[in-house]
Amino acid sequence: MLTALSSQLGGDNVVEARGLSKRYGGGVLAVQGLDLTVRRGEVYGFLGPNGAGKTTTLRMLVGLIRPTSGSVRVAGHEPGAPEGLARVGCVIETSTFYPYLSGRDNLRVVAAYARLPESKVEAALEEVDLTGRGRDRYGTYSQGMRQRLGLAAALMKEPELLILDEPTNGLDPQGMVEMRDLIRRLGQGSRTVLLSSHLLGEVEQICQRVGVINGGRLVAEGPLEELRGAEGLLVQAEPAEKAREVLEAALSAAAVRRRDGYFELSTEPSLAAELNARLVRAGVAVSELRPTERSLEEVFLKLTGEESRR
């Protein structure tokens, strides 16, 4: 049974879920024991492979489906509560509009249902760069324009929280760039954006903090820099054999790996000055020495278990 979170939850969190689970008929467990925190004013990337449970989670957050168990508050209210929905805009899966109406008239329909003034329509069209095509029928829009109109509909009530589910799906490369730029702009200031994606580059370019979901479970959460982590040192030095001898003597043979003209060292970056001094004393010329960090792709593959299947 869904329970309300206690009043001790901090006001800086726009989304806070604890132990959120969803089991469908036939025993399919789509989301299990998920803990999720989205802070006010950040662009949060909800990252995971297709089928990981991202869309199911987002549908629970806005009240489209009920969790099987767990606790959750969104914009200070239970999912689906009118008071909370008034503060949340979302584009989950594919937006649908009347193909024979113009983009502007479609937004007027949405505004009428939401009891919003018509002035919100023009402001939303301008925010997503569709003012010049507002008179055109929705049926003539490209996929990118359709995505932007869906975003405009979500923006009309000036939401505190904007939830976007795979917003660049189906877009060509230029459309993806334009959508990323738009989301980056929308995420400035006090507005919070929760963005689900399976595209690593998209998350890396837009988001400040990331949660990685796999098999319905949140397997990692934190700032991008923290998830990548500094794993060691990268050294370029000559003569290479002498450099290897010095490095292996200082660390161990297992901690020194030669690849693409560099030595990859599994050690604390704080040892950089000491290792550099040892190499120089041994007559080795060091042309490069810097900390290394894992790419988001490496982190993702390790967390989701894809690395072992390669």
Image (spheres, helix red, strand yellow):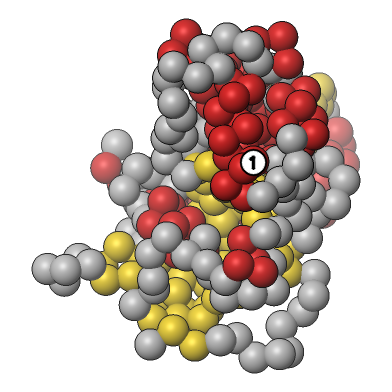
Would residue 22 appear left or right of 72 to someone viewing this image? left
Going 67% across and 50% down the picture, which residue do you hit?
115
Would residue 140 appear left or right of 177 to someone viewing this image? left
Q: Amino acid at mark 1?
A: Ala
Going 46% across and 71% down the picture, which residue do you hit?
34
Indicate whether 259 appears above or below 226. Answer: above
Residue 89 point in image, percent of width and height: 63, 49
Q: How many labels, in total?
A: 1
In-front residue for pair 214/5: 5
In-front residue for pair 104/251: 104
Going 79% across and 34% down the picture, which residue do you hit?
119
Q: Is residue 267 visible?
A: no
Query: Which residue bears the numbered disc 1?
Result: 111
Locate the C terminus by quadrant.
Answer: top left
Going 57% across and 35% down the picture, which residue do you hit?
109
Q: Is residue 85 visible?
A: yes
For label 1, the crowd category at 10 Å Cα-Cα, with few meaning under 14, some 14 to 19 and many 20 or more, is: some
Residue 243 point in image, percent of width and height: 69, 32
SS at mark 1 in the image: helix
Residue 163 point in image, percent of width and height: 59, 49
Q: What is the residue that sits farthest to the left in this orientation?
A: 26
Would residue 227 appear left or right of 66 to someone viewing this image? right
Q: Give the quarter of the image for residue 26.
A: bottom left
Locate the N terminus by quadrant.
Answer: bottom left
In-front residue for pair 284/17: 17
Indicate whether 102 appears above or below 190. Answer: above
Indicate whether 61 appears above or below 229. Answer: below
Residue 300 point in image, percent of width and height: 48, 46
Would residue 63 appear left or right of 286 to someone viewing this image? left
